[in-house]
Image: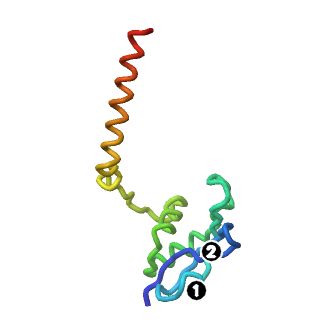
C-alpha cells in the first residue's frame, strides 16, 4: 500500500480550506483517509499563526514509515522545518519563448531610440 501525505479540499466554492491527511494513493482526493494531521487555510495571511496547523510529530512518524508527501505538502513541511526539500530550479524553462524575446528586443530598441531623441532636446 502506497501512502501519501496530501491535501483534501473542503470549504465552499471559491473559499478553499484543506485538511492535511495521510491516505492511500489510490483513494480519491477528498475520499477516505487514514489519519488527519492538520489543516491549511490558504486564504489567511502568510504570516498568520493559524494558516497551517499541523502535528509535526505525526508527520515525521508517517514519513519515517514511508509516506510520501505531495509537492505542496512538502513545501509546507519544509516551512515548518519538518522536512527538507531540494529547491527546483530550471532556468531554461523560465526563459521567454522566441516570439516574446523578439517583442522585448523591439520594445527595448524603441525605448532606446525615444530616449536618444529626448536627450538632445533637453
Of residues 87 and 64, the one nearer the viewer is 87
Asked whether, in this view, residue 20 is left or right of residue 60, the answer is right
- Vertical arrangement, residue 36 with respect to residue 118, above or below: below
Circle 2: is it few (<14), some (14-19), or many (20+) Cα within 10 Å? many
Which residue is labeled 1 in the image?
33
Residue occupying image coordinates x 54% and y 73%? 59
Q: Which residue position holds label 2?
A: 19
Residue name at image x 29 percent, y 53 percent: 92
Residue shown at 46%/79% (left/top)? 67
Q: Give the percent coordinates (x, y) of residue 104.
A: 35, 40
Q: Position of residue 101 (x, y in %)?
A: 32, 44
Residue at left 30%, top 43%?
102
Residue 93 vs residue 63, the one in the foreground:
93
- Identify the image quadrant of the C terminus: top left
Q: On the image, which quarter does residue 16 sit in?
A: bottom right
Q: Name the secondary structure under disc 2.
A: strand
Residue nearest the viewer, comparing 8 with 112 = 112
Residue 105 versus residue 68 in the image, above or below:
above
Q: Are marks 1 and 2 in contact (CB under 8 Å)?
A: yes
Relative vertical location of residue 122 with respect to residue 94 in this rendering, above or below: above
Q: Residues within 10 Å of mark 1 (few under 14, many from 20)?
A: many
- Assign the N terminus to one quadrant of the image: bottom left
The answer to which of 16 and 99 lies nearer the viewer is: 99
Q: Is residue 96 above or below residue 70?
A: above
Q: Position of residue 12 (x, y in %)?
A: 70, 73
Q: Earlier in the sequence, mark 1 or mark 2?
A: 2
Label 1 to label 2: alpha-carbon separation: 10 Å
For the residue labelled by badge 1, is the local secondary structure a helix, a strand or a loop? loop
The location of residue 58, given as percent across then percent down, is: 56, 75
Amino acid at each position: 500500500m502506497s501512502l501519501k501525505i496530501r491535501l483534501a479540499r473542503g470549504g465552499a466554492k471559491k473559499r478553499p480550506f484543506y485538511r492535511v491527511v495521510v491516505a492511500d494513493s489510490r483513494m480519491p482526493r477528498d475520499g477516505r483517509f487514514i489519519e488527519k494531521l492538520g489543516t491549511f487555510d490558504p486564504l489567511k495571511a502568510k504570516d498568520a499563526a493559524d494558516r497551517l496547523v499541523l502535528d509535526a510529530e505525526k508527520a515525521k512518524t508517517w514519513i519515517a514509515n514511508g509516506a510520501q508527501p505531495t509537492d505542496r505538502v512538502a513545501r509546507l513541511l519544509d516551512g515548518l522545518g519538518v522536512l527538507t526539500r531540494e529547491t527546483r530550479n530550471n532556468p531554461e524553462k523560465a526563459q521567454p519563448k522566441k516570439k516574446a524575446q523578439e517583442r522585448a528586443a523591439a520594445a527595448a530598441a524603441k525605448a532606446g531610440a525615444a530616449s536618444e531623441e529626448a536627450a538632445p532636446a533637453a
